[in-house]
Image: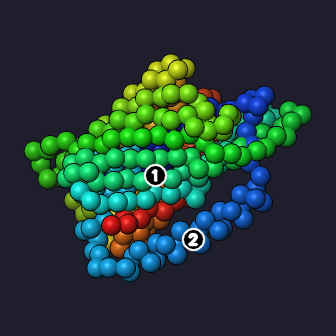
């Protein structure tokens, strides 16, 4: 986020359809999630103690939140941001739709102001129940490639950056293969006294299904040495139709390792009733 993001830059997923359905085997998801969590925490602990690192070395990660950080990695830095799950739940009459996504993102610092991003939804679990149906399934999702550029600022308290990305439809429908999509987003952050901050994120998209836009203001109201908390709102139109309010927390527990937890409450019929995320971000070098 702010700069702290969430699902994010993350657009809301339309309810996929097998018929028009969501899947996700919970016992299997729980077991795989436990294994992923243990491995990630082991890597995080190793990374956090592998060398001399200080809080100043830690970048503003793009997780969690709707938007993304308004700064970039330094040249030669490498960060890994992993969702244990980014999930959504929606109820429409008797039909309940659930989706969990394990998104992985690698960020490479190409220069002092430019970074390359590679991301993939490594696993997508979906389930739809009610209305005479109970369907579930999981598979790999789509990938994306992006380039992020930090822009000049006249003040040390203000930062902003552009992020252009393109989707790579490598997944299998309905978990992926959503077609080509192009996004151009901007995120600006303002540092306030006592570690607090404001941020504003905007994004325009174009895809085979049409175009869309989204805007999200956020406010980090608490920022301690290791803990931070924020609130955010999101509004969008076109293919990115959404209305949501949410909050999240981050915990920097091993110098270069951050855990995050976030939640969004949908406020419109086109937005999932609930969205949430749990993830880890690691500065690898």
Q: Describe the colour scheme in one phrase.
A: rainbow
Q: Would you call the spot at circle 1 few (<14 residues within 10 Å), some (14-19), or many (20 or more)?
A: many
Vertical position of residue 41 compared to residue 240: above or below: below
Read off the residue under disc 2: 39
Vertical position of residue 229 compared to residue 100: above or below: below
Lower position in the chain sequence, tag 2 or tag 1? 2
Identify the residue at horizontal 61%, vertical 39% (top origin): 171
- Percent coordinates x, y for residue 17 in the rendering: 73, 30
Element type where label 1 sits in the image: strand
Vertical position of residue 156 compared to residue 237: above or below: below
Report, in whole angstroms, how far the alpha carbon at label 2 lies from the one at label 1. Answer: 16 Å
Residue 30: mark in rendering: none
In the rendered image, the quadrant that contains the C terminus is bottom left
Residue 187 in which image quadrant: top left
Query: Residue at the left extreme?
Result: 154
Residue 213 in which image quadrant: top left
Identify the residue at horizontal 46%, vertical 77% (top origin): 45
The reply, left or right, for residue 10 in relation to residue 130 is: left
Nearest to the observer: residue 184 or residue 267: 184
Q: Would you call the spot at circle 2 few (<14 residues within 10 Å), some (14-19), or many (20 or more)?
A: few
- Percent coordinates x, y for residue 175 in the rendering: 66, 39
- Percent coordinates x, y for residue 108 in the rendering: 33, 53
Vertical position of residue 26 compared to residue 18: above or below: below
Residue 280 seen: yes
Identify the residue at horizontal 67%, vertical 33% (top origin): 173
Element type where label 2 sits in the image: helix
Nearest to the observer: residue 275 or residue 83: 83
Residue 194 in which image quadrant: bottom left
Read off the residue under disc 1: 105
Identify the residue at horizontal 33%, vertical 41% (top origin): 147
């Amino acid at each position: 986020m702010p700069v702290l993001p969430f699902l994010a830059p993350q657009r809301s997923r339309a309810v996929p359809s097998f018929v028009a359905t969501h899947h996700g085997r919970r016992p299997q998801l729980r077991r795989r999630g436990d294994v992923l969590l243990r491995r990630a925490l082991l890597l995080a602990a190793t990374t956090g103690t592998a060398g001399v690192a200080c809080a100043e070395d830690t970048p503003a990660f793009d997780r969690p939140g709707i938007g993304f950080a308004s700064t970039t990695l330094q040249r030669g830095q490498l960060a890994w941001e992993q969702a244990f799950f980014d999930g959504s739940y929606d109820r429409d009459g008797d039909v309940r739709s659930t989706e969990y996504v394990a998104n992985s993102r690698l960020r490479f610092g190409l220069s002092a102001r430019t970074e390359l991003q590679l991301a993939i939804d490594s696993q997508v679990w979906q389930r739809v129940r009610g209305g005479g149906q109970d369907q579930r399934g999981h598979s790999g999702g789509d990938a994306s490639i992006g380039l992020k550029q930090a822009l000049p600022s006249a003040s040390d308290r203000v930062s902003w950056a552009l992020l252009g990305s393109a989707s790579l439809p490598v997944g299998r429908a309905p978990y992926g293969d959503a077609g080509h999509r192009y996004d151009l987003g901007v995120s600006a952050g303002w540092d306030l006294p006592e570690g607090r901050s404001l941020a504003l994120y905007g994004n325009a998209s174009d895809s085979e299904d049409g175009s869309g836009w989204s805007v999200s203001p956020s406010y980090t109201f608490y920022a301690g040495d290791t803990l931070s908390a924020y609130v955010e709102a999101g509004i969008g139109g076109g293919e990115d139709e959404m209305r949501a309010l949410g909050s999240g927390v981050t915990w920097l527990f091993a110098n270069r390792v951050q855990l995050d937890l976030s939640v969004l409450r949908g406020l419109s019929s086109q937005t999932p009733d609930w969205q949430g995320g749990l993830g880890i971000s690691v500065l690898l070098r």
